Image (cartoon, grey):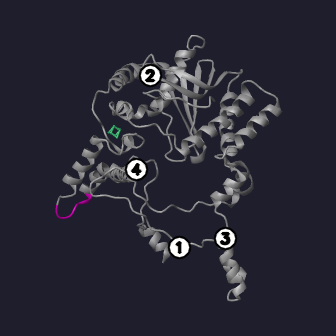
Amino acid sequence: MSAERSHALLSASSASRWLVCSPSARLEEQFPDVESDYAKEGSLAHEICELKIRQHFVKKQSAATYKKKLKRLQEDPLYEKEMDGYTDEYLDYVSGIVHGFDSPPYIAVEKRLDYSHVVPEGFGTGDCIIIGGDTMHVIDFKYGKGVPVKAEGNPQMKLYAAGALKEYEILYPVEKIMLHIVQPRNDHNNSGLIYKEELESWLNAVVKPGAQQAWNGEGEYRPSEETCRFCRAKATCRARSEQNLELAKEEFKKPPLLSAEEVGPILQKAKDLKAWAADLEEWALKEVLSGGTVPGWKAVEGRSVRKFADQDKAFQILACSGMIEEEMLYVRKPHTLSEIEKMLGKKEFRELLADQVVKPPGKPTLAPEEDQREPITLQTSAEEDFKEE
Ligand code: SF4
């Protein structure tokens, strides 16, 4: 991968935002695009993926050169051993696709994909493109472990597919496109099929007009929990603020008690309220810390916990005092499952300990109806009650 992944104004990764809230792209321009540590960690993992895929499928270099390059990446302060397991998982996934063809397919890695025929100045970077027969695979590696991302119908993936199609359709008779997202830290690898014709009609009917509107900074602001989550304007965006304040004003003043029928729609609308308040708080703190004014607010020192200025010295004093045995000063504590998995690497962990892992049921949590998990209840059936007795 190139050292830096540059971004278009209408980037594929933010398409799910600007296709819904079209003025967001221009509004975001006022805010610096700061790369978070998570993003830097993701870029490093992408570089390791690229190196591994190239070594296996594209241009083989000597084992010594490969090891040297891998070692250099592993020296990065953001590198963690578990990155090897996760990038191996990506390599396995790509291998599965490559070996599914009867004859060796065409493979491109970290490919710049130009989709400016449908989105002004649109381009992005596809992690891996594989083409054989009439099928093209577009694969995206996601190192984040937040929300699981679905490949099917995903605007980012479809824009990558548009760029890849433009690049390769002269050379290959592509009719079917498989979109894949490999998200190993979430155990969430998934794929979805789209036909070329279907993709083209989406590009013409939805993307072209939507992108033009976004490019011009026109259209309506459409705040929602999903749309605003990663928007750089999310803290001070007026539309988001008005929507949340309107909700607070109208819905919560209804007296005296809410019914379950009322609570459902309110929770739907309030999904963004908590996140918005937290974003505002974070923004205001930055503002006052940098010398600005936010009427009614100031920065203060938060709660702090006492600690020894020099722990070794304090323990030495205690040991010399004879008042407490040295071993009483330490607690022997097992590492958590995640910490051990991190130390060993995912693959090795699975090989050694897969039989030892159990997953107890999670704490009940409220989820919207469309959530894919099975609904649960704490009510026992009459049959179960009888069994107990
Ligand atoms: S914060 Fe939300 S509503 Fe405001 S511009 Fe961004 S996406 Fe649109």
The magenta-colored residue range is 255-260
| Residue 319 belongs to the span the image colors magenta | no
Q: Kindly report which numbered mark, 2 or 3, lies closer to the viewer in this rendering.
A: 3
Say which residue label 2 marks. 198
- The residue shown at (29%, 27%) is 218
- Write the residue at 49% across / 21% down: 162
**Residue 273 visible somewhere in the drawing:** yes
Does label 2 or label 3 sit earlier along the sequence?
A: 2
Q: CA distance from mark 2 to mark 3?
A: 56 Å
Q: Are marks 2 and 3 in contact (CB under 8 Å)?
A: no
Which residue was labeled with disc 3?
Answer: 333
Check contact, mark 4 vs mark 2: CB within 8 A: no
Amino acid type indicated by mark 2? Glu
Numbered disc in front, either 1 or 4: 4
Mark 1 or mark 4, which has the lower sequence index? 4
Where is 106 relative to 49, above or below?
A: above
